[in-house]
Image (cartoon, coloured by chain):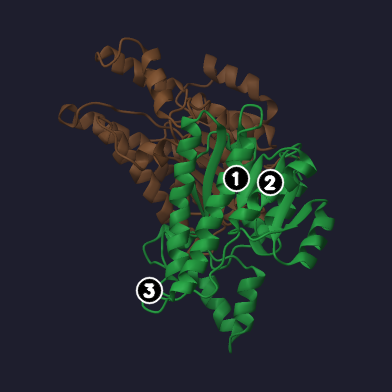
Amino acid sequence: MGKLDGRVALVTGGLRGIGLAIATRFVAEGAQVLLADLDADGSEAVGAALAGLGDQAAYISANVTDEASWHAIAEHMRSAYGAAHILVNNAGIDLTGAVESLSLEAWRRIMAVNVDGVFLGTRALVPLMAQSGADIAGGASIINVSSIMGIVGYSEVSAYNASKGAVRLFTKGIAIEFATKRMPIRANSLHPGFVKTPLLNAGFQRWVDKGFAQKPEDLVAAMEGATPIGRLAEPSELAGPAVFLASEDASYVTGAELVVDGGWTAQ
Amino acid sequence: MASRLEGKVALVTGGTSGIGAGAVRRLAAEGAKVVFTGSKADIGEALAGEVGGLFVSHRVEDAAAWPALIEAVMGAYGRLDIAFANAGTEQGDASIEDVSIEGWSRLIGINQTGVMLTVQHAIRAMAKNEGATGAIIINSSMNAARPLGNYVTYSTTKAAVVALAKSAAVYCGQKKYRIRVNAILPGVVETDLIRNIMESMPDPAAVRAIYEGMAPLNRMARVEEVAGLVAYLASDEAAFVSGAEITIDGATTAGMMGV
């Protein structure tokens, strides 16, 4: 018996990194999982993800910044599953650089993906989740993937800090809203620390290109040294926390922050 | 019940009632061998029989009695993997203007020194595990974040143990121990203690409504709900979670209204 038997989940940014790890665990816990990502149907990554996940998973090509994409996702969930119990707003991008060097275009891009995407996803699925949540123990669950960078600042990460901070407080706002309106939807933010994802690797490579380090491995070693647990997280280590927040065990947890950072922000 | 804690040994302080008793039941249900402490021997023995665990009569603030408690754990089960520093009280507390030095010192002893002793002795025992593994959970309170005017000592101690959790988590990292330390911050939980308070009032229903209304979710937490969070943090599901403070309060402190 899985912790998520009978539940339907949507995971954005579901083809790689934390999103794919969460989708994999959700399937193992009995959920039906719809992955959303930018790839066209039938791409190599889509084929690989669905081959790994089996019959309980499906894919929908979508852009989280696009209202029409969200309309299509909501319609698909209504027609294909008739329910939506779990929404993982995971899709995100990063942006680094000295604040005076950031273009308005780049700023607007990260806000569009990391903030608009979370708002649009929430807005699109709340009506269906409000119905579905009444049928499931612990209610429906929105898990917004913020970051430790949504809690503490970091040099040359200001735009990412701003976007993830917005996700953190947006989540508290909707949590209070749903609770006071007696809507059966909980909302919490998940705050990963440094996780071995394609996004982190790409970020490290950019730091190397800028001359901050000789090779990405040096940055990994520095990050490991600065993390109390002494290592970076595997994407799969974000899946257990997501299962907890999605499950009946978290029935009184709403408006909360779940930090999964190996002690980084405790220092 | 999933057996996430099979083969693990847990210690719960203040395990004879409320959240502690809920945690004893949940940890046992997930496969852990549970040793728990308290002062009510009859209740403790009954619960031990129910869950197949071990009750030890022990006061958490009694530093001299801690080595014997750890010996009892080791004698019964040979190791320690999980510690839930739960014992705490608000009895005898007052406002900053009225609190007595005796009341203040007594609560500091139980809520703060007691937690320190629990974490200290747990780490010493867990460091002996292969790979120095373990999970420690400290029961703080949402009042660490939103202190109560008429409970100055309680609020102060609950904030202090959050810092203690983080310090211990960072220390374990520095020592290369694979021991995780986290704090949980529950809102109002419908324990027997709270039920007794409600029933002692002239209008219990009105008091219940006040407690329930504190949370946007408009109800108190059930003991089992807090125990679910404790079991999650105790399990390998939370392998990268350390030094964290996790709120379980039905969104009470998510807003700025205070409590």
- Amino acid type at mark 2: Ile
Q: Nearer the viewer, mark 1 or mark 3?
A: 1
Q: Is residue A196 left or right of residue A247?
A: left
Residue beneath the point at 63% across and 56% down: B225
Name the residue type under label 3.
Ile
Q: Tag 3's secondary structure?
A: loop
Seen in the picture, residue A59 relative to A127 is either above or below; the reply is: above
Q: Is residue A200 visible?
A: yes
Q: Chain of mark 2?
A: B
Determine which of the numbered discs, if any, sits on residue B96 in the image.
3
Count of number-bearing discs: 3
Q: Looking at numbered disc 1 in the image, what kind of residue is underneath it?
A: His
Left or right: B238, with A210 as reference point: right
The reply to whether residue A244 is visible in this rendering is no
- Judging by the rendered image, the residue that carries numbered circle 1 is B121
Q: Which of the two discs, 1 and 3, labels the residue nearer the N terminus?
A: 3
- Per the image, the residue denoted by label 2 is B70
Q: Which chain is brown?
A: A
Q: Is residue A185 above or below residue A31?
A: below
Q: Chain of mark 3?
A: B
Query: Are circles 2 and 1 on residues that touch, CB within 8 Å?
Result: yes
- Few, some or many C-alpha atoms within 10 Å of disc 1 (few <14, some 14-19, many ≥20)? some
- Hue used for the chain lettered B: green
Residue B229 shown left or right of residue B157 in the figure: right
Residue B241 placement (x, y as % from top left): 52, 38
Question: Which element is circle 2 on?
Answer: helix
**Spatial CA span between label 2 and label 1:** 7 Å
